[in-house]
């Protein structure tokens, strides 16, 4: 528990929060009002939002009254179960594009039977192919996860040996691999054989030019964040004093975001512009750790950071954030009715800023509830 004095990051006014942060005279963007919306549920008391498109459609999961985790879509204030097979006890929608195509994973709670899926209004659920070595006795033991889909319908994610495989070779091209599916009916393509070996390894994001970001974990040697572009894999450099970069998101201009270890004592959000070194994004006030997970077309970034929360005594708690070089890292507020000292929040995705209104939607969760933050970002006309 931390015992330090704190400043407040905003002023609550009629259900909105005005983000209060010092701005430089040359700033292009400034954060204005932030509105919080708690998303509808299926009634099971546990929900999370993982992606949002430029039409305001949101995907994630919500538990139903039977406590089964169901992949869902939120649109127009309503929640819709995507209809993953009812025999599946756990399903999660992880990504979508502006065409409304959705990808994710489903299976049993033990994680030994996960399968990647694609969904559209026209096709319903399609299970993606997870066969990497047809004809081999171990091929049936692979599980798949889909994490993102671009506007052309190209899907990325991972295929790995299940926890009860027993037969899959312990070699770098077999156990855990970043994958691309060119369409919902395509055979999976291995992006490259991960240097980090057993993993978990995965492709995590894809942009409109089919550039892919991902990560490769290996406890015995340095982890790698990677960019895959036109068949060439590039390891993303860690910032100064950093190691083990891991990439989670990228935009169409080639900016990648994620996290890295700083001096082996903390994990801090990073950004890489595609050339040169990557840079630290820092943390919110009083925090030691942060991670960036998504970046939009204008370079706004969201993720999660620790922050010291004011109360009878200060405590460290997670907060969703919005970041831009013009104003730095700004905490997004906890919805009314949730105790700020005991509520953890994560930012999982954001969409592009609307030029006419200045609105950006950020989605994630606070406590057990899926949340949408509607953020007004003003342009400084004086510049």
Image (tube, rainbow, N blue to C red):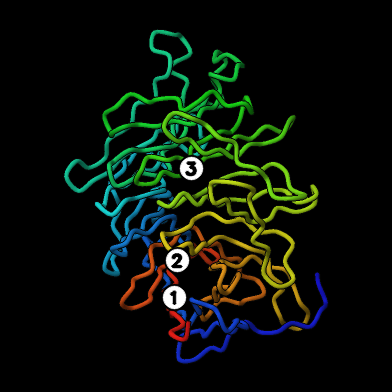
Q: In which quadrant will I find the N terminus? A: bottom right
Image spot of residue 61 (x, y percent): 41, 53
User: For mark 3, what is the residue?
Assistant: 204
Residue 86 in which image quadrant: top left
Counting residues from the N terminus, which is met first, the one under dot 2 or under dot 1?
A: 2
| In the image, residue 244 above or below residue 30 | above
**Outermost residue to the left:** 122
Q: Residue at x 49, y 76 (%)?
A: 28
Q: Nearer the viewer, residue 220 or 125?
A: 220
Label 1 with label 3: CB-CB less than 8 Å: no
* Mark 1 burial class by Cα count in 10 Å: few <14, some 14-19, many 20+: many
Label 2 packing within 10 angstroms: few (<14), some (14-19), many (20+): many
Label at residue 375: 1
Indicate which disc, 3 or 2, sits on the residue closer to the N terminus. Answer: 3
Residue 376: % across, % down? 42, 78
Label 3 crowd bin: few (<14), some (14–19), many (20+), radius 10 Å: many
Which callout, 1 or 3, points at the residue further toward the start of the chain?
A: 3
Q: Nearer the viewer, residue 325 or 315?
A: 325
Q: Residue at the spot x=57%, y=50% of the render?
A: 272
- Residue lying furthest right: 3
- Report how far apart the C-alphas of labels 2 and 1 lie in the structure: 7 Å
Q: Name the residue under label 2.
A: 362
Tally the numbered discs.
Answer: 3
Left or right of 163, for residue 218: right
Q: In the structure shown, which secondary structural element does the residue marked by tag 2 occupy? A: strand
Q: Do the residues labelled 2 and 1 touch (CB within 8 Å)?
A: yes
Vertical comparison of 212 with 135: above or below: below
Q: Distance between the residues labelled 1 and 3?
A: 25 Å
Secondary structure beneath label 3: strand
């Amino acid at each position: 528990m931390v015992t330090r004095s704190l400043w407040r990051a905003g002023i609550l006014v009629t259900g909105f929060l005005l983000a209060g942060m010092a701005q430089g005279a040359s700033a292009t963007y400034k954060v204005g009002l932030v509105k919080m919306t708690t998303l509808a549920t299926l009634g099971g008391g546990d929900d999370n939002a993982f992606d949002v498109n430029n039409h305001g459609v949101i995907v994630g999961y919500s538990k139903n009254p039977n406590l089964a985790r169901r992949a869902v879509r939120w649109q127009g204030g309503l929640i819709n179960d995507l209809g993953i097979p009812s025999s599946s006890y756990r399903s999660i929608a992880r990504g979508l594009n502006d065409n409304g195509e959705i990808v994710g994973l489903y299976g049993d709670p033990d994680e030994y039977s996960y399968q990647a899926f694609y969904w559209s209004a026209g096709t319903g659920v399609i299970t993606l192919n997870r066969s990497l070595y047809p004809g081999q006795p171990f091929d049936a033991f692979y599980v798949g996860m889909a994490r993102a889909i671009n506007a052309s319908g190209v899907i990325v994610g991972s295929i790995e040996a299940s926890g009860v495989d027993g037969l899959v070779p312990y070699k770098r091209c077999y156990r855990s691999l970043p994958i691309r599916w060119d369409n919902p009916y395509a055979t999976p393509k291995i992006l490259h054989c991960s240097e980090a070996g057993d993993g978990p390894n995965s492709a995590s994001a894809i942009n409109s030019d089919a550039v892919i970001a991902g990560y490769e974990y290996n406890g015995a040697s340095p982890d790698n964040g990677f960019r895959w572009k036109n068949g060439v894999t590039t390891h993303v450099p860690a910032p100064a004093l950093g190691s083990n970069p891991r990439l989670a998101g990228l935009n169409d201009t080639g900016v990648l975001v994620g996290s890295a270890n700083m001096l082996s004592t903390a994990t801090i959000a990073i950004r890489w512009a595609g050339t040169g070194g990557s840079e630290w994004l820092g943390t919110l006030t009083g925090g030691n750790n942060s991670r960036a997970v998504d970046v939009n077309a204008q370079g706004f970034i969201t993720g999660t950071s620790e922050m010291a929360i004011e109360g009878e005594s200060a405590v460290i708690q997670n907060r969703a954030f919005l970041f831009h070089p013009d104003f730095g890292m700004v905490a997004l507020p906890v919805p009314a009715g949730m105790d700020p000292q005991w509520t953890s929040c994560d930012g999982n995705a954001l969409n592009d800023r609307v030029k006419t209104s200045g609105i950006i939607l950020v989605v994630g969760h606070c406590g057990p509830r899926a949340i949408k933050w509607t953020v007004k970002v003003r342009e400084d006309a004086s510049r």
